[in-house]
Image: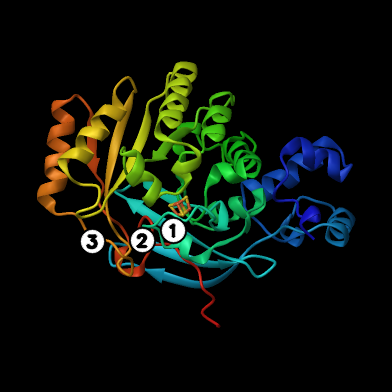
Amino acid sequence: MAENDLKGLNLYELEDCLKLPKFRAKQIYHWIHQKHVVSFDEMANLPLDVRKELKENFYISSPKVLKKQRSKDGTIKYLLELEDGELIESVYLKGGEDRFTVCVSSQSGCSLGCKFCATSKMGFKRNLLPGEILSQVYMMPKVNNVVFMGMGEPFLNYENVLKAVYILNSKEGINLGARKITISTSGIVEGIKKLADEKIQVRLAVSLNSAVEELRSTLMPVNQKYPLSELWEAILSYQRKTNRRITLEYILLGGINDSDKDLSALVMFCKGLDVNINLIPYNFYGGEFKVSSKEKSSHFIEKLKSKGIESVLRVSRGNDIAAACGQLVAFNPRG
Ligand code: SF4
């Protein structure tokens, strides 16, 4: 049962739950969060009777790897089965010599129905627990960058996502720098406001995809609840409180959001905000949209630059195994 899973507990909760001396709880925390063991038998510095008692009362969750696919560019996609049979995907990307990124899911499926996203086709299954989020990081060989850009809307699972973030950042855990953690939201205004008040300085990205009200509402139904003006206000107030630049993500959809009118609306949206823009080539090849032309993306970059807005065209990774942005969707290969 999930409440007996020790992986999702921070150090204070672990001390409280185990009723063992503090140094013992810390040893166990190190085994789980630094050495990533999933069996009490491996905790060699614990007396046998302590290990036995732990085994009788608790466990350390670990998802089952159902499938592992490697892309030509080295990206690896994992299909994972959670304890209750729900499925998620995680993606491991190597960038250069020393950048090891894991793109984690925060929910199984998603309820938000963005038109360009494969995950939305799954519908919403459930929120992930903190331990299930951490497992996606701990199962990778080496990680120095974590992005919440897999399945799901992180701010609709705010408490569990932030708990996992604090554990990742903890000195007794893997001590991952807060600036090495990025949370990407579709624009859940309450989440942006809450994050501004957190003690931790993680990076924030907002998946914008259109700054034209009607079009954004069509592409991302979440815009009907949180229209552009509210989103803009939330970003501004986040920046006033934190002094942090944010990233706007913009998937270029050929003939849909890549016209001059779309570009002008994007420039207008950026006014007064400290942002950089990630332009993302459309990736979901089974989907209903087309890729935007190279000329269009270059035009976007040049125009944004002329307006003093930094932007980059993101190189798509893991396309051939459907591991790129917007492609994650999980179905059980066993049928
Ligand atoms: S893009 Fe993100 S928020 Fe939108 S449906 Fe996909 S997973 Fe959900």
Determine contact: label 2, label 1, CB under 8 Å: yes
Q: Where is residue 16 drawn, in percent x and y?
A: 85, 38
- Any part of residue 120 in sight: yes
Q: How is the image coloured?
A: rainbow
User: Which amino acid is tagged 3?
Assistant: Lys
User: Which amino acid is tagged 2?
Assistant: Thr
Whole-angstrom CA distance, mark 1 to mark 3, is 24 Å
| Outermost residue to the bottom | 335
The image quarter containing residue 268 is top left
Name the one closer to the observer, 71 or 301.
Answer: 301
Which residue does the numbered mark 2 point to in the structure image? Answer: 75
Q: Where is residue 70 drawn, in percent x and y?
A: 37, 68
In the rendered structure, which disc, 2 or 3, sits on the residue that comes first in sequence?
A: 2
In the figure, is residue 327 to the left or right of 252?
right
Asked if the beta carbon under badge 3 is closer than 8 A to the nearest atom of ligand 1, the reply is: no
Q: Residue at x 66, y 51 (%)?
A: 131
Which residue does the numbered mark 3 point to in the structure image? Answer: 290
Q: Quadrant of the N terminus?
A: bottom right
In the rendered structure, which disc, 1 or 3, sits on the residue that comes first in sequence?
A: 1
Single out the mark in the foreground, 2 or 3.
3
Whole-angstrom CA distance, mark 2 to mark 1, is 7 Å
User: Which amino acid is tagged 1?
Assistant: Val
Which residue does the numbered mark 1 point to in the structure image? Answer: 91
| Outermost residue to the front | 214
The image quarter containing residue 307 is top left
Q: Residue at x 73, y 38 (%)?
A: 11
In the rendered structure, which disc, 2 or 1, sits on the residue that comes first in sequence?
A: 2
Q: Quadrant of the C terminus?
A: bottom right
Q: Residue at x 42, y 54 (%)?
A: 114
Query: Is the residue marked by circle 1 packed among few (<14), some (14-19), or many (20+) residues within 10 Å?
Result: many
The image quarter containing residue 172 is top right
